[in-house]
Amino acid sequence: MPPQQSEKARKTDFVDRIWGFFTSLKLVIVLLLILAVLSIAGTIIQQNKPLHEYYRFYKPETVALFNKLGLFDMYHSWWFVTCLALLALNLLACTMDRYAPIIRGLRKRDLILDEKLEKSLHLKDKMKYALPLETVEKSFLAAVGKVFTGKPLITQQDDGSRHFFFEKGKYSRLAFFFTHLSVLLIFIGALIGSFFGYKGYVNIFEGEAISQVETRAGGRENFDFTVRCNSFRADFYSSGAPKDYQSDLSVLQDGKEVLRKTIRVNDPLTYQGITFYQSSYGTLPDRVQLEVRGQDGALRGVVDAPFNQKIAVPGSNELVEVADYQDHFHLPDGSEGGTAVGINIYPEQGAPAGLWLPISHPDYDKMRQAPHYFLVKDIKLKKYTGLQVNKDPGEVTVWVGSLLLIGGIMAAFFISHKKLWVCLRKDKKGRVELTVGGTTNKNRTAFSREMTDIIQSLREVS
Amino acid sequence: MINSLLFGISIFVYFAAMVLYVSYLAFRSETLGKVATSCLLAGVLVEAAAMGARWYESYQLGIGRAPLTNLYESLVFFAWTIAVTYLILERKFRIKTVGAFVAPFPFLIMAYASLNPNDIQPLVPALQSNWLIAHVVTCFVGYAAFAVSFGVSALYLFKVRAEQKTGRQPGAFLGYVPASDTLDEVSYKTIAIGFPLLTIGIVTGAFWANVAWGTYWSWDPKETWSLIVWLIYAAYLHARITRGWRGTKAAILSITGFTATIFCYLGVNLILSGLHSYGGQ
């Protein structure tokens, strides 16, 4: 053999082996089970927590190891994604591999019930009638028509025999494509979503509007419109359990309202492919009046602080900022302290300090033993609604894939391709001889019961 | 309330059905068999009435919701779907002796359910959705099919050992059980019913999650475990249909699949945390 040819042969051999690997059933089963086993890890180790939280559960060296292996975000780790990619390749290769045989199975039609075909069938029978051919034909068509509702293909042979070919559920052979390509479609939809979509979260105060959102990936997305929260409402059952959360939202374009909808937990608002979901709610201070007093109790001044703004403290070089709020503050001894305002103090030099001011304990900050202390004199609260924001152009693809998957699985299990042949001919004595035979590609027990019924009703033709 | 009373009665009826099915296997009297089936059917009817009463009573309390929303309600529904699935299969495949291996499930699950709080609570906002019924029913009928398949597969393993030992003439007790080939076939047919239902359950769950939370898949433990169950049965079906895996290997995969199902249903709620954690309250 010339060297070139052997080289080529080796190449084909190599390609064949790769192809064989990707189309092997062993690979499918092993991959499915590996994915199942790997997935367990991510349900035991909590995913996507801030790194410092893991130190509470694991030793530092374990945290370092898990982090390196990607176990804290394992469903996006290179090894898990590789397994999914292998599964996708495997699905694609198997679909290509099975394409020709399935299409052949769809096309192949032996229209004539000859001896060879008759021999290959397991379910068959023969009977004779002393009736005119037309009567037999009419009666048997009626009997068979109860199961095979479609029109038969009729062939007239030169020897005078008439052959009838019935089939049913032919296209169930395509179920293979639906079940396998639909999974690929779902993968594609998920990829589209992760490349061209985003998820984010935003708080909107009542009466205020936003036109951008902070995404989970850490970026910012701007809208071509603004969303205003007209009002928010939370309803509770008498037991105290939540009953309903409602945000009355308006979509504004160039200052004009183009859409208004009250969203609830299972009823989001979608505009220009971006969907807003009711996710949380809360109260934050709009403005807080703080009194500044010396340790002797003498009033040094009053600060009127809007939320999240640094304001100069009278009689000192400090800045103060109202940064947080809570309904149920716990005092150091663990008892209920009521509502409290969280402030940050920025000294001229050094690190800022955060502290809480419970409204019903005006002397609370005195304990800090600073030259002066703060107390809340007045507070104006504002409600906000917390919205999950989602843009996912791949969603439709995922749902189409899911529907095809369900339909494909149903067809694969519950519809079979059944074929039935009937041949009518006259024997030497002028009687009509009827030969019937059938076959199916799955669910043979049920089909043999159907065939028994058909044969029984053919015997009763008179 | 009437629903609690009816649920209480159904526990006793299921207990009686279990005892009858086991006695049927032991004494092999056809009359006993008929009584066992009627008894299980009676349990199903009483429990259906109980669930109906609970639904109705929730309206009287001014809450008005399907009884499918907490651990107690899901357990009693699970017990019911197992009994119904089994009765259908018993009729279809004439496998009454299998009853001794399946009938204990409804009783044990109902007994376990009765340990959980059963007052009718109103729904939190996330559960107020039309997807609730479709999602829960498809998932649980799927689970029930897997439970029956598990019982049949376990029986298969006993039967096949008996067949091998005594050379096709097994001992008195297992001699009455259907042939191992039949058990193998029934186990497969049951999974073939459960798998599409689980698929629909996962898809409706994903769709609902997308409507409620804006994400159809977030790898939360419940979602992930349902996928694990799906993957195991998908492997089973590929092995069985195309590689011709039958018998012991298939039975072991079926048993593994149901173990994962139980963990997906109870383990996740009781041990792990996630979006479905309210189920464990």
Image (cartoon, coloured by chain):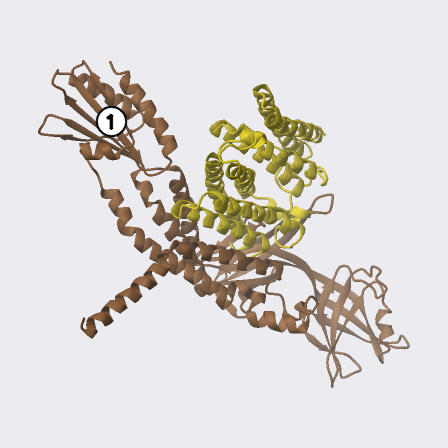
Chain colours: A brown, B yellow
* Direction right: furthest residue: A296
**Residue in front for this viewpoint, A253 or A164:** A164
Q: Is residue A392 left or right of residue B49?
A: left
Q: Residue at x 26, y 21 (%)?
A: A142
* Direction front: furthest residue: B166
Q: Residue at x 35, y 57 (%)?
A: A23
Q: Is residue A132 left or right of residue A278?
A: left
Q: Quadrant of residue B30?
A: top right
Query: Up-down: is A241 above or below A161?
Result: below
Kindly identify which chain the residue marked by label 1 belongs to.
A
| Image coordinates for residue A266, horizontal then vertical, percent | 56, 48
| Image coordinates for residue A71, horizontal then vertical, percent | 57, 66
Number of numbered discs overlaid on the protein picture: 1
Q: Is residue A250 visible?
A: no
Give the structural element (helix, strand or loop) at label 1.
Answer: strand
**Residue in front for this viewpoint, A121 or A377:** A121
Given the image, on which type of amino acid does mark 1 rest?
Val
Label 1: which residue?
A436
Q: Quadrant of the C terminus of chain A?
A: top left
